[in-house]
Image (cartoon, rainbow, N blue to C red):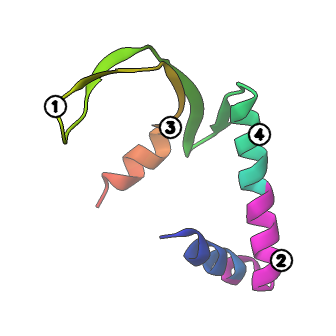
Amino acid sequence: MNKSELIVAFSRETNLPVRKAQEVLDMVFDTMSRALIAGDRIEVRGFGSFSIRKYGEYTGRNPRTGQKTAVKGKKLPFFKVGKELREGMNKK
């Protein structure tokens, strides 16, 4: 499911116009993005949690040339699935 399909499904479930459903979901995603950028952790009970993981520098390799190159450390979002979602997926 992509974002536009999610918007349509949300619109149907809530009986909101598609444009209003898009505004609501955009607001939710923007708020989550700002929280993660600020270093906050997001937990949605029964669904999962989002956090930021820090990765250190390492030596990588260019796949085309095989040349070694230094890769800077970085921060990336990480999702950990919640127990209820994990168990729900394994019931079928």
Asked if the residue under mark 4 is in contact with the one under mark 2, i.e. CB atoms within 8 Å, the reply is: no
Asked if the residue under mark 3 is in contact with the one under mark 1, i.e. CB atoms within 8 Å, the reply is: no
> Horizontal and vertical percent for residue 49?
58, 35
Upstream in sequence: badge 4 or badge 3: 4
CA gap, disc 2 and disc 4 = 21 Å
- Identified at 71% across, 33% down, the residue is 37
* Mark toward the viewer: 2 or 4: 4
How many dots with numbers?
A: 4
Is the magenta region chiefly helix, strand or loop? helix
In what element is the residue under mark 4? helix
Q: In the rendered image, which quarter contains the C terminus?
A: bottom left
Identify the amino acid type marked 2: Lys
Residue placed under numbered mark 1 in the picture: 66
What range of the chain is rendered magenta?
A: 12-27
Q: Which mark is residue 79?
A: 3
- Identified at 81% across, 58% down, the residue is 27
Q: Quadrant of residue 10?
A: bottom right
Magenta stretch: includes residue 21:
yes
Upstream in sequence: badge 2 or badge 1: 2
1 vs 81: above or below: below
Residue placed under numbered mark 4 in the picture: 34
**Horizontally, is 79 left or right of 89 in the view?**
right
Identify the amino acid type marked 4: Arg
Q: Quadrant of residue 68?
A: top left
> Horizontal and vertical percent for residue 15?
77, 84
Residue placed under numbered mark 2 in the picture: 20
